[in-house]
Image (spheres, rainbow, N blue to C red):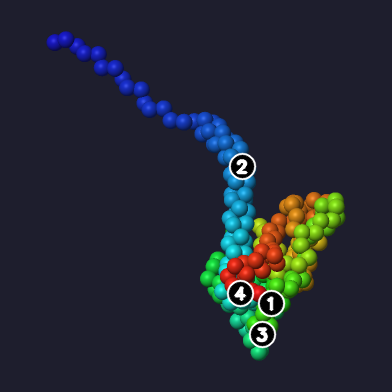
Amino acid sequence: MSSRHIAARSPLRGFTLIECAIGMLVVTFLISALLPPLTAQIEQRQVSDTQATLTQIADALMGYSTANGYLPCPDLTSGNGANDGLEDLNGSATNCAAAEGNIPWATLGIQGTDSWGNHIRYRVTTTFSDRQTLFKLSSSGNISVQCPASSCGVATTYTNSAPAVLVSHGRNGRGAVNALTRSLNPAASSTDELANSDANTSFVSRTPSAAGAAAGEFDDQVVWLSTAILLNKMITAQKLP
């Protein structure tokens, strides 16, 4: 009988601990390199989506005005009926319970939050929301939007007569009402962001800046209605003169 030579099989060789550690280190480096660009892309998408939401709300306000002859009232942020998305009127139902609050998203039938889950702030000039004495061609808003010299180098005024203004308080959400908890977020820490949440007629719109910047942190997005455009739409809809 002829003899056969049977070759011994080599056992399968696994990864050593050192090889596994090197592999994990490489993966960590790759993830670290990819995360900043990915995070920046997500943040930019959130900003773009919120800007689109603000534009849609502005269009909805224009449509509401041409249909009714006046702008809607804000949704109150405290008290009875607060944060329910419905506009709140005064006792005689002739004007608003407050000039500033949340956008009344349920009344308008639209989305009322930004990309970070906070309600959009809305302020209206009461002349344009009065149900008893409807606004006229001679009416003018009393809301101003500007960039102060301390932030822009040269003071810039965008409008002094806006009928209404919309504000997203951005990624940090300071000064906004959270849509999930229906509670007020912490107050803004910078002068310009405070200007957008102090319940008066003056608002700030400018280039975003990070915490620690000379002009202070700012990530608010601000959109306002134009008196001229609103009146023109009312004329086209035959609501004026």
Q: Name the amino acid, label 4.
A: Lys
Q: What numbered label is drawn on residue 87? A: none
Q: Residues within 10 Å of mark 1 (few under 14, many from 20)?
A: many
Separation (CA) of disc 4 from disc 2? 50 Å
**Amino acid under label 2?**
Pro
From the image, which quarter does the C terminus lie in? Answer: bottom right
Q: Which mark is residue 239?
A: 4
* Secondary element at image label 1: loop
Give the mark nearest the N terminus, 3 or 2: 2
Neighbours of disc 3 within 10 Å: few (<14), some (14-19), many (20+): few
Task: Name the residue beneath numbered marker 1.
Answer: 135
Residue drawn 66% across the image and 89% down it: 91
Q: Residue furthest bottom?
A: 92
Of helix, strand and loop, which one carries label 2? helix
Q: Nearer the viewer, mark 1 or mark 2?
A: 1
Distance CA(mark 3)–CA(mark 1): 9 Å
Q: Residues within 10 Å of mark 4 (few under 14, many from 20)?
A: some
Give the quadrant of the N terminus: top left
- Is the residue 230 above or below the residue 83 in the image? above
Label 4: which secondary element:
loop
Q: Position of residue 25 (x, y in %)?
A: 57, 35
Question: Which of pointers 4 and 2 lies earlier in the amino acid sequence?
Answer: 2
Q: Are marks 3 and 1 in contact (CB under 8 Å)?
A: no
Disc 3 or disc 4, which is closer to the eye?
4
Residue under the image location 74 percent in, 71 percent down: 141
Distance from disc 1 to disc 2, alpha carbons, whole Å, reads 49 Å
Ranked by sequence position, the earlier of labels 1 and 2 is 2
Q: Which residue is mark 3?
A: 132
Looking at this view, is 18 or 7 the one in front?
Answer: 18
Residue drawn at 68 percent across, 83 percent down: 133
